[in-house]
Amino acid sequence: MSSAARPPRQARLVLLDVGGDPVGRLGPVEVASPWWPDVEPLVHAVREQHGLDVLVLRVLAPAADDGSREPVGGAVTYLAQSTRALTAEELAGLEPPPAAVLGDALDDHPLRAPWARPGGPTSILTWADDVLSRAGTPRTAPAEQVKTWNLSSILRLPTARGPVWCKSAPPFFAHEGAIIAAVAARHPRLVPHLLAADPATGTVLMADVPGEDQWSAGPARLADMVEAVVDLQDEWVGRADELLALRLPDWRGPALAGALSALLARDDVRDRLEPRELDGVDGLAARLPALVAELDACGLGDTLVHGDLHAGNWRYGPGGLLLLDWGDSGVGHPLLDLPAFLERLPGDQQDAVRAGWVRQWRARRPDADVERAIALVPPLAALRQALIYRTFLDRIEPDERIYHRDDPPVWIRRALQLSATD
């Protein structure tokens, strides 16, 4: 469903003062953008309607974990913090928050992201400002909060040389800065220009990337993407130890088969499936060692896997094609990236892109059985997606699980469908 077809958000904010103490609740504020993590229009609406500048910290207890709603549109409550001291008049205009909501707002959780805690975004901004000042490009205006949710916080920092992007991510994505730097060593135009990284908060500072997202890329541009990816992956074949040293996850054959087998054996995973599906799950789990062994035998080798290689993560600008969002990256079979690339393309483009992938790998690995690898990889790639989403659920706080709670069974069911046709 398109954004226009989604209902707008009716957002309420439980507001903390600059010291982190609760001072009241405001709203509802209607926001046309339905996507809960999209906080830039919410911040603008609060400024326009209430004269307050806030930093949104997180969603508060959105719903019971029963699949009763999606994190899109409708009523939603956020915890936010004022960026300045409030006047007596402003405080008087706030309504008191319900006790239940207030308690949830103040309770801490060990899995809470640094940017979701009171003072968290300000602390990240302090680090970023120090980096920019030392580089001679200090921030020239207030930071603009763009996005916040369990997987990232994105702030846009105005400077005299253009915007700088401040992106923070959870520990399981904290290798993003390291892999961007490693790729940039030989392909500086393929990745954003990294200004600094703070592994403690999983934060990277990146220069602006002028250009356009490539959701609607045509055949020639798609072919250039495939060539760029295969070039890069070919360079990293045989260098798994270097990638693992950067803290990228291990999705190589035996490790992947073990992780997927453990995933399919979990009660909290199996409970989300229909009883009639469990025999298929067990059959697929039994086949995993042989499946990954056959895939490895196709002769392409393990390498860098981007992990979220769809056309929307590419931008095209003055420097050519550039690939974004490296937090999902790992080490494994290169064709694990192919299904995600194909999935969001129109059907009439998929065959040509698939053929391009074959052609590019044949040119570099003439003895490899690329076609067989392409036939084998789809169920493994789908199960890897289920594993990734289950990992998110294991490592994020309960209030934030609404974003991913339905994804593992969706991807397991897709893997069952794909394994029935391989």
Image: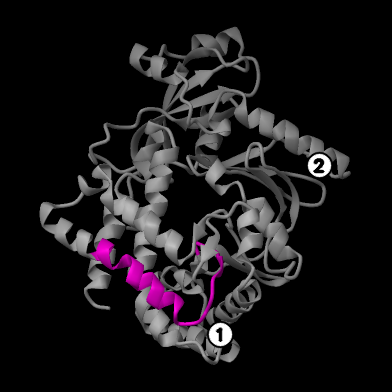
Query: Is 95 left or right of 117, judged from the image as shown?
Result: left
In the depicted structure, whether residue 118 falls above or below residue 140: above
Residue 314 image offset from top left, x and y in percent? 57, 67
Rendered-image quadrant of the C terminus: bottom left
Residue 376 image offset from top left, x and y in percent? 36, 77
| The label number, if any, that marks residue 132 in the structure image | 2
What residue would you read off at disc 1? Answer: 220
Magenta segment includes 13: no
Residue in front for this viewpoint, 47 or 297:
297
Residue 8 image offset from top left, x and y in percent? 37, 42
Q: CA distance from mark 1 to mark 2?
A: 38 Å
Q: Residue at x 69, y 65 (%)?
A: 183
Magenta segment includes 292: yes
Rendered-image quadrant of the N terminus: bottom left
Q: Residue at x 43, y 45 (%)?
A: 392
Label 1: state its secondary structure. Answer: helix
| The label number, if any, that marks residue 152 in the structure image | none
In the depicted structure, whether residue 277 falls above or below residue 39: below
**What is the magenta range?**
284-308
Q: Residue at x 48, y 31 (%)?
A: 111
Query: Is 154 left or right of 266, judged from the image as shown?
Result: right
- Within 10 angstroms of label 2, few (less than 14), some, or many (20 or more) residues? some
- Within 10 angstroms of label 1, few (less than 14), some, or many (20 or more) residues? few
In the depicted structure, whether residue 361 falls above or below residue 54: below
